[in-house]
Amino acid sequence: MKAQKGGSLGRRDVFRMMGAGGAAAFSASVGLAAKSPRSTTRATSVAWREVNGVDAERHDLWQQRMDWWLDAKFGMFIHWDPSSLASVEISWPIMAPSPKWPISQEEYVNLYQRFNPVNYNPDDWVKLAKSAGQRYMVFTTKHHDGFCMFDSAFTDYKITNTPYRKDVLMMLVEACRRHDMPLGYYYSPPDMHHPAYRDTSKLAKENWQGEPARPQWPVYLQYMQLQLRELATRYGEPSVFWFDGLNDQAKFDGDHVERMLREISPSSLFNNRLGTPGDYETPEQFVPDRIPVKGIRIAGTNPEEENRLPSGLPRPGEFKPWETCMTINDTWAYDKNDHNFKSTKELIQTLVNVASKGGNFLLDVGPSPHGDIEHEFQGRLRDVGKWLAINGESIYGTTYGPLQDLSIGKTTAKGGTTYLHIFDWPQESVEISGVGRVSRVSLLARGDILEFKRSGNGVTVQLPAQAPDPYDSVLKIETS
């Protein structure tokens, strides 16, 4: 790190030092691609306005991070803690007990005493993410059960008090640095283990939403803030803070927490699950049918939320960045009995669907209690990566496509180019009507130039008899 003239470090340098850390007919205009969100994206939270919004250097650091994130499109989510030993979902077996998770609370909370992931190799995880074409990772530092997967100074319920004893988060932070992989921190404000969050003499199923009316509540808020500050300083400035505040999020004093973190981690992005608008929306386990816009909160697993979104393309400045998180099977954490894996085709087409609406796709893996990632996950991730190695131009750095609600596939856009993702390959030709002046059409995968004829306001593109790709064949449509 270089000092400015005169030997003193600039404010930007100080900020950085704080961080250790893509015949059928359709109509519309492909010539008029949506304006890139990069030029119009602004955060809407009070904390952003009070910290980043009033300081040019902090604003620039945040904008650079947002531009990168909008381009990145595809990330790896990791849910992992001692619950993997029992092959049950993380946290929920004690919060909402169910016959499908046959474990008592006493057994669950003591699983850490046997947790010893001797096969854990964070470099392998990062290399897997890179081979999948994923451009960032988000790791669960603490889930609702309260168990910390980092060596927090403020609790004994943590990874370094297991037989493994090593700080798995720091190991991952260092691996991500070695491989130039941005890392974000998932952190759960709810905490079933902390006695100031809830009366722990009761079962968690009785009071898992927390008890902010108790006099101990401020003690819990202080604990949460200390741990978040610890993560941002000891472990390094994360690419994102991924909160999961569940219900009644106002009780976590999100404005104060976000302001504190933006002060010490000015480039970090914030999701919308801390009781504040954050920087991006977070639908879970579904892809909205419409493009998210500012002023309409989308978070969680209820797809009916999308009904509040307007149809059509948003005007410049209305688009709200968003990210959907999704599992490869039906479980966030490791479950050796869950074999309901999504196919490679479904994963690729989901990624394309997300990108066609301007979003990011955060795809989850749940490592085993030994620290391995299942072969079924690895195979699908690498297959997605092979597709992206050929077709990534139509995903990375794109924004929502100008043509929505197509019967044969999706569109993404970048500058004056529209990418037509064809899921259901037409016979002989595809008609594109109501477009600007098309100057060139090609197959993205092979570079083959395709013949087309103009007719009225549209063109008819001649197609090969066979689809070039079994999952998604992409036409690159350039306009002049």
Image: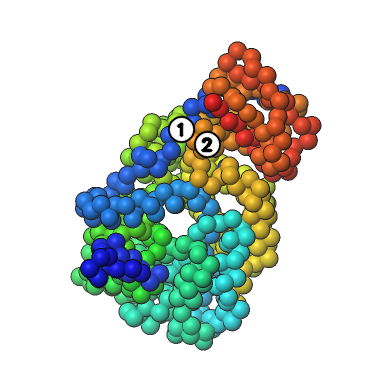
- Asked which quadrant contains residue 233, the reply is bottom left
Q: Quadrant of the N terminus?
A: bottom left
Q: How is this picture coloured?
A: rainbow
Q: Label 1 is placed on what type of residue?
A: Ala
Residue in the image at 34% along x and 81% along y: 153
Q: Which residue is mark 1?
A: 34
The answer, for residue 62, to whether it is visible in the render is yes
Under circle 2, the secondary element is strand
Q: Label 2 is placed on what type of residue?
A: Ala
Q: How far across and how far down the image is residue 351, in percent? A: 57, 47
Distance from the alpha carbon under mark 1 to that under mark 2: 7 Å
Q: Looking at this rendering, what residue extends furthest in the front direction? A: 5
> Which of these two is toward me, 388 or 470?
388
Q: Earlier in the sequence, mark 1 or mark 2?
A: 1
Q: How far across and how far down the image is residue 473, in percent? A: 68, 39
Q: Quadrant of the C terminus?
A: top right
> Which of these two is toward me, 12 or 124?
12
Residue in the image at 53% along x and 52% along y: 74
Under circle 1, the secondary element is loop
The dot on residue 72 is none
Other residues around mark 1 within 10 Å, as few (<14) / some (14–19) / many (≥20): many
Q: Which residue is mark 2?
A: 413
281 to 480, vertically: above or below = below
Q: How far across and how far down the image is residue 427, in percent? A: 76, 27
26 to 52, vertically: above or below = above
Residue contact at pointers 1 and 2, CB within 8 angstroms: yes
The answer, for residue 354, to whether it is visible in the render is no
Q: Looking at this rendering, what residue extends furthest in the top direction? A: 456
Q: How far across and how far down the image is residue 28, in percent? A: 53, 23
